[in-house]
Amino acid sequence: MTLCVMSSLLSYNSPRLFLLIMLGWLLAGCDGAQLNNPYRSEDDGKNILYSSFSERPKHLDPAIAYSSNEYALIAQIYEPPFQYHYLKRPYQLIPLTAESMPQVHYFDKSGARLADDAPVESIATSEYLITINPGIQYQPHPAFAWQNGKYAYHELVEENTQAIETLDDFPLHDSRELMAEDYVHQIKRLAHPKIHSPIAEVMKQHIVGFTDLAAELKDVPLTELRDKQIAGVQVLDKYRYKIRINGNYPQFRFWLAMPFFAPMPWEADVFYAQPGLKEKNITLDWFPIGTGPYYLAENNPNRRMIMQKNPLYHDAFYPAEGESGDYASGLLADAGGKLPFIDKVVYMLEKETIPYWNKFLQGYFDASGIASDSFDQAVQFTGEGDAQLTPMMKEKDIQLQTAVTTSIYYMGFNMLDKVIGGDSARSRKLRQAISIAIDYEEYISIFMNGRGVASQGIIPPGIYGYLPGQQGINPYVYDWQQEKVQRKSIEAARQLMTEAGYADGVDPATDEALILYFDTTSVSVDDRPRMNWFRKQFKKLGIKLVIRPTDYNRFQEKMRSGSGQLFLWGWNADYPDPENFFFLLYGPNGKVKHGGENAVNYANPEFDRLFEQMRNMQDGDERLALILQMQDILRRDAPWVFGVHPKSFSLYHGWYKNLKPMLMVNNRMKYIRIDAAERQQKRTQWNTPQWWPLLLMLIILAGLAIPAVISYRRRLHGGAE
């Protein structure tokens, strides 16, 4: 829009002329354009999805990345061999780059092949044979550029990179075909000590030869990794490779759908290792290189990140089948459509929730979470406790999507601690009493706007082994009354305290209130109400809770050394199987002794025995029976206060298509479609400036000013006479 600027109001001889010019400026210069549009006007109506980020993802290397904000990007760029079906529930693995699901063969200790139905105890190793589709191409990248019979940018010297600031500064970009070798190369990268992959320790337990390779690679640069071999992983030909794992571990198929097992071309390691590039943030953590539907075209952590549609993306199509009800809800309207639907994804930096929320309401962001300070504006609860949109949201045709996440937040008891830990009846009853006293239903209401479900055990809803209703309650903390779950009374908790030797919360060793220490990284002013709430929960038992705030590095050190006592922790499912939660309390995964994910250092021989038996079984009645036994052991021992399964509340504008809760589907972006024409129409409707109040004010001001100007001119002319 062009704004008209007047040089001087006093230069006009007629007040009426001034009024006419002001009217012309408002009606002609301000022609209905959106003055608050944060994007370029030439992008209006284009097939672009707009989202945001508050903090730049730290890692985009798939061997290292492990957080949700990192997966939001890399899952659109990298492609492991398998993926989850977008529409089917329970979640179903299907091929992605692979030609079909893996062929799995079993072998005994002598190396002889076993029958497919061989007893689990006879299986020494399992072999996964994977065949990938031919013709899949990587995104264009300088690492593949070829010139004069060799790679154009594999022998850079630092002087040649002085003018290079980003990948676009390399004039040559090229591609090559995806090969089985690339998947094997990535597995070797997981084993490299310098990569520090978060799953390296887990894979040492499973992949044959992984531990030996890790030791061999201690002083080997990544650029020489291609020449190294790993005993359990082998390239068979251009499109086939196999992975051999120890024993029978059916959950390994889920790992093969994670970015950790996406392909990595050896050229990437050679290219990014060259001098002068790391200093300019030209690394794999800033510029991924994959075969997925998108590539990261711009990575500016101080402003925005942009993903562009991969021009070489292979054929992929929207699913033609799903669950019952998907057709009626419009989720199959795009069946058979070529993916991806969106040409570009723009992530804008938004550190504050209020500006982000306002831009969402104006239509400048296509989706939004709901911050606490805007929750009541967006959502209201019915008398039955069901969430629904407010009239204002409905008027804007905004969609609400809710889902209980496959995650858990809990309070952990350090089982190595002499007061709160251990296997004695005394410490167990103390933990059970605390589990009753901490009223997580109240916590969810006060601090989470009702966005959560109090946990009955370690397994969240949606994971195999979770049982709803009366059969799934934690009987050590809850009762089943009037067809619903009810937390036990505080009197029941106090009775447990008495049985544990802490009547009225008094420590017999000191004849004073029992003191427990709560280590936390919640140190801001905004965290104080929550910390005070926890103090009150313990005070109900007569316990004095001492909050020990600390920075994250110090907190991590306390966890590694086992010097903490109480703490809050959480876990998001990597894959939809109970093994991914039970392993958090498996003895050999103890954090202090083994550096594993068992942060509370729980060790119960019976639980460990059942875990080792359960994890290698296919789903069925026998496995479910073991899962229920394990749940009961954990509920009795109470190494955690089973806290909350969060419930996600997300808002989407009506032009955002193909919405379905997809807690395991990380590569969702290719399935989303935006009705850009509808979005532009709504943006114009919601954001066109309303000039009539200003116009009316100007008319009133002009009406008041004209008599004074006329009088002034008369006096001036009269004086001249």
Image: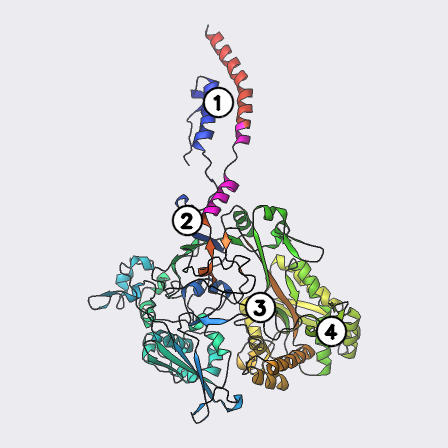
Q: Amino acid at mark 1?
A: Leu
Question: Callout 4: few (<14), some (14-19), or many (20+) C-alpha neighbours within 10 Å?
Answer: many
Q: Is residue 681 magenta?
A: yes
Sooner in the amino-acid sequence: mark 1 or mark 3: 1
Compared across the picture, whether 191 is left or right of 387 comes to: left
Compared across the picture, whether 50 is left or right of 651 comes to: left
Element at label 1? helix
Sooner in the amino-acid sequence: mark 1 or mark 4: 1
* Location of mark 1 (residue): 19
3D distance between C-alphas at marks 1 and 4? 78 Å
Disc number for residue 580: none
Marks 1/2 in contact by CB < 8 Å: the verdict is: no
3D distance between C-alphas at marks 4 and 3? 27 Å
Compared across the picture, whether 718 is left or right of 609 comes to: left
Instruction: Compare residues 713 and 102 and report the one nearer the observer.
Output: 102
3D distance between C-alphas at marks 1 and 3? 64 Å
Question: Callout 3: few (<14), some (14-19), or many (20+) C-alpha neighbours within 10 Å?
Answer: many
Q: Nearer the viewer, mark 1 or mark 3?
A: 3
Disc number for residue 46: 2
Sooner in the amino-acid sequence: mark 1 or mark 2: 1
Name the residue at 49% across, 48% down. Answer: 364
Element at label 2? loop
* Location of mark 3 (residue): 406
Q: Position of residue 83 (x, y in %)?
A: 46, 69
Q: Position of residue 101 (x, y in %)?
A: 44, 75
Name the residue at 46% across, 77% down. Answer: 200
* Location of mark 4 (residue): 433
Q: Nearer the viewer, mark 1 or mark 2?
A: 2
Q: Which residues are magenta?
A: 677-695
Q: Identify the residue at the far bottom of this view.
A: 110
Q: Position of residue 234 (x, y in %)?
A: 36, 82
